[in-house]
Amino acid sequence: MIEFFLDAYKNASITQIILEFVVFVFGILSVWFAKKENIWVYPTGLIATVISVYLLFVAGYLGDMMINGYFSIMSIYGWYKWGRKVNDTEELPITRTNTKEKAIGILLFFITVLVVFGIYKWFDYEIHKENYLDIIASGIFFTGMWFMANKKIENWTLWIIGDIIVTPLYAYRGLGMLSLQYLIFTIMAISAYLEWRKILNKSNPQL
């Protein structure tokens, strides 16, 4: 296992290793803050995603780069939403998606899949089998980030599914640190879902 991680960075520059480590640390911090329903999820996440955009651009992984670019934009949106008071008094509460929000989520997923696929074609990148997993994960993560910005508990279900998809994908590509990070994300997302569900059930016992 240790050799697997070391081999992945034999030809990597010190700068790349340091940047990946920063992404690793701040990414985990962001998920931990999200679990605790703490607004610091967004500034920590923003640091991780902006650096990831650069690293993935250099590596040539367009689908993953787009995911993180969107994360950066949605972090700013989520920061605003979580920081704004509902009716100028209450913080945004954890809720479940209604029928309209589910429909928006499904639409967002398919639009994202089409856009990412189109970008691969536009830049004439050869689409390998694993890139289709990128494309699907993009749709899942895009939708999950939108749900999180609106404090919908279903965001954690999407994170869990997406994390399970990309963890072995990054390992296959030799991106050991990212693979380990998403494995940790999977465990944290399961824990966060359970914690948010307790909060939701306490505030809405009839649900």
Image: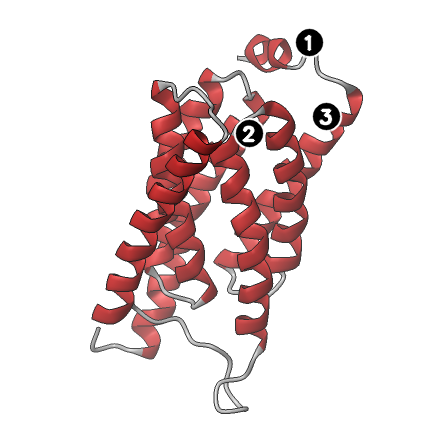
Residue 121 appears in which quarter of the rendering? top left
Q: Which amino acid does label 1 sit on?
A: Lys
- Disc 1 + disc 3, Cβ < 8 Å: no
Which disc is residue 16 wearing?
3
Q: Is residue 123 above or below residue 67?
A: above
- Disc 3 + disc 2, Cβ < 8 Å: no
Residue 180, how many percent across, how many down?
A: 52, 28
At 57% from the left and 56% from the top, the residue drawn is 73
Q: Is residue 124 above or below residue 77?
A: above
Q: Mark 2 points at which residue?
A: 178
At 60% from the left and 24% from the top, the residue drawn is 59
Q: Is residue 16 left or right of residue 194?
A: right
Which element is circle 3 on? helix
Q: Pointer 1: residues within 10 angstroms few (<14), some, or many (20+)?
A: few
Residue 46, how many percent across, how many down?
A: 64, 52
Q: How far apart are marks 3 and 2 (CA)?
A: 12 Å
Q: Earlier in the sequence, mark 3 or mark 2?
A: 3
